[in-house]
Image (cartoon, coloured by chain):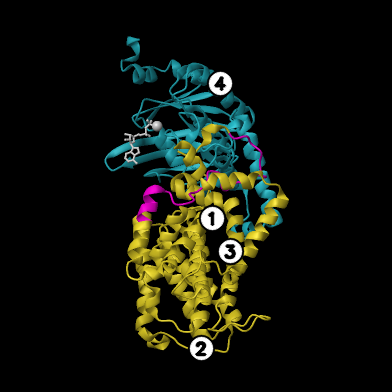
Amino acid sequence: MSENVLELQNITMKFGGVTALNEVNLVVKKGEILALIGPNGAGKTTIFNVITGVYKPTSGDVVFQGASIVGKKRFQITKLGIARTFQNIRLFGESSALENVVTGADVHSKTGVVGSIFGTRQSRREEKAALEKALELLEFMGIKKRAGQLGKNLPYGDQRRLEIARALATDPKLLLLDEPAAGFNPAEKVALGETIKKIRDAGYTVLLIEHDMSLIMGISDRVAVLDFGTKIADGTTTEVQNDPRVIEAYLGAPADAS
Amino acid sequence: MADMKSRLNLRDRGAEYWERSPKWRRVALSIFFIALCYAIPFLNNPLINTPGSDFRSVLFYPVGMYVMMAIGLNIVVGKSGLLDLGYVAFFAIGAYTMAILGTKTSLNFWEILPIGVALAMLSGVLLGTPTLRLRGDYLAIVTLGFGEIVRIVAVNTDAIGGARGIAGIPTPPNFFKAKFTILDPKPYYWLLLTFTLLIIWMVRRMAARRPGRAWDAIRQDDDVAQLMGINTRRYKVWAFVLGAAVAGVGGVVYASQILSIVPDQFNLNVSILILACVVFGGIGNLWGVILGAVLLAFTPERIRFLSQPRILVFGMALVLMMNLRPDGILPKKKREHFDPDWHTVEESGEGEIK
Ligand SMILES: Nc1ncnc2c1ncn2[C@@H]1O[C@H](COP(=O)(O)OP(=O)(O)O)[C@@H](O)[C@H]1O
Ligand SMILES: [Mg+2]
């Protein structure tokens, strides 16, 4: 039980007449990279939105570290230890790269507005800690030289890396990456894959949405496949690769035809 | 052209000079600047004179008052991006607290001040908590309504003078040698200046720290701010309440100077004018906002000798300025929330705004 960082239990998410997720069950185990794959519109991003409290599921439960988080506010869920990136990059474009990451690191600060005004010892200590952590993470993501640049002025790839740094700054128990390698060239994908592995090896648990099969096969511990809002497979990379339903979903043909 | 533009870029040149200055020079410049502000009432320079109205009165109102209020409103509009069109209400609450308690009790200015500020903040909480979940235009309309409601309630409440307002508001007790009388606006100006400097000091600290980052995040993308762990409701209410506190201080000081107030002084025009100071000066940038308020408050007084056409001239100058510098005179600088000492990261040219 404690092995499972996250459990989606019979999650159904309807938008009006559209059923984006249908009775989805999914388990993310501590310390693994779980890849979530599926065609466009399958409901992958919706799963992230349900986990992070952007949407309240129509039915079902989201259990994080043994407790339900359905109905909790978004900022509370982040504080509990879930952080994410966005398929369509959503940085604070008018803030510097460093500020973006420090904003994530602020989650751990206890200083409020009054403490900040008067510069209490706690405030100064937390400001310093947040800054140091942010600089470390920029370095880790290989974008330290961008620290002073505005988010919107970063090159595309660095914007994606910055989003990961910002999410890591909250020190998540579960990191959700929504197509972090989208638009990358093969060399950049390999490098990002190595970075994600390093993140896992540092003790983080990662749920990764990705389309690139070689990247997924290279780094994932397990794979879950979503199709039209239904989970059709879940297992090791080899298991999933040979699953007839997956082959059908991806090739649009009966399994025996391949 | 490009060269002229860069030469005209006061903000970057000023900021650069400041960042390159050693600590002693910063301290010296600050002391000089502050001393200059305190000395302005003694200056008799024809450039800054206000023929047609008393220069020292102008320094207190409108100049000093606008500056303080613009700094307060900038926390709300500039920092956290909440369009508040009823800011005058908090000013009115401060002024009425001073007027009512000053005439009906034996409390003096210094005792009433914290009460006025507390009441302004309390009304900020009461207005902010339910309304701050509204976004953009809706919030603007609700706050506009609030501003008008406060004024209309004052007009219709006979216990606080109704439309005739309150007269005979006491002046602050003498402060060492400074005597607060209707005849001499200087001590009031100094009092206002002192409060303003204190507020600037506080605002700068907030802006450079966690609250500043939270407001930046909220202003840019409320959803993502929440997903980054920011309790956005709470920070918005804080912005509202801090803005209200500043206006509360302004209201108390104002009422203690002009001796009598009427509700119609606290009309929508005041909210709009203060907002104009913020936008004109450079929304979000403290120094821009201060400069904007000084110019907007001072210019109509300076050109009073033009009599009738002066508002027209002023209006045309405003329109022209906003066309030339649509982001304000001193727009927000890119890294304003980070102290240059705080980190040393070389800037590459790519980071330019625009
Ligand atoms: N807020 C929403 N309102 C209506 N429909 C939505 C909303 N969010 C997602 N959907 C629908 O849910 C389905 C899954 O979308 P999404 O989760 O973004 O897919 P994926 O990330 O797998 O490409 C799509 O049909 C999409 O149109
Ligand atoms: Mg998606």
Real-space Cα distance between discs 1 and 2? 37 Å
Q: State which chain disc 2 sits on.
A: B
Q: Residue B89, image x and y in percent?
A: 42, 71
Residue A117 picture quarter: bottom right
Kind of residue sitting beneath label 1: Trp
Co-location on one chain, circles 4 and 2? no
Residue B310 picture quarter: bottom left
Q: State which chain disc 4 sits on.
A: A
Q: Is mark 3 within 8 Å of ligand 1?
A: no
> Are the two marked residues, 4 and 3, in contact with CB atoms closer than 8 angstroms?
no
Point out the residue furthest to the right here.
B24
Co-location on one chain, circles 1 and 4? no
Q: Which residues are magenta?
A: B318-347
Q: Quadrant of the N terminus of chain A?
A: top right
Question: Mark 4 packing: few (<14 Cα in 10 Å), some, or many (20+)?
Answer: few
Residue B275 picture quarter: bottom left
Q: Name above or below for residue B331 compared with residue B4.
A: below
Label 3, secondary structure: give it.
helix
Q: Which mark is residue A191?
A: 4
- Is there any visible trace of residue B133 in the rendered image? yes
Nearer the camera: disc 1 or disc 4: 1
The cyan one among the chains is A
In the picture of the structure, the residue carrying the numbered disc 3 is B199
In the picture of the structure, the residue carrying the numbered disc 1 is B287
Q: Main secondary structure of the magenta part?
A: loop
Q: What's the residue at 36%, 36% (across, down)?
A: A21
Q: Is residue B5 magenta?
A: no
In the picture of the structure, the residue carrying the numbered disc 2 is B103
Real-space Cα distance between discs 3 and 1? 13 Å
Q: What's the residue at 63%, 83% (across, down)?
A: B174
Question: Mark 1 packing: few (<14 Cα in 10 Å), some, or many (20+)?
Answer: some
Nearer the camera: disc 1 or disc 2: 1
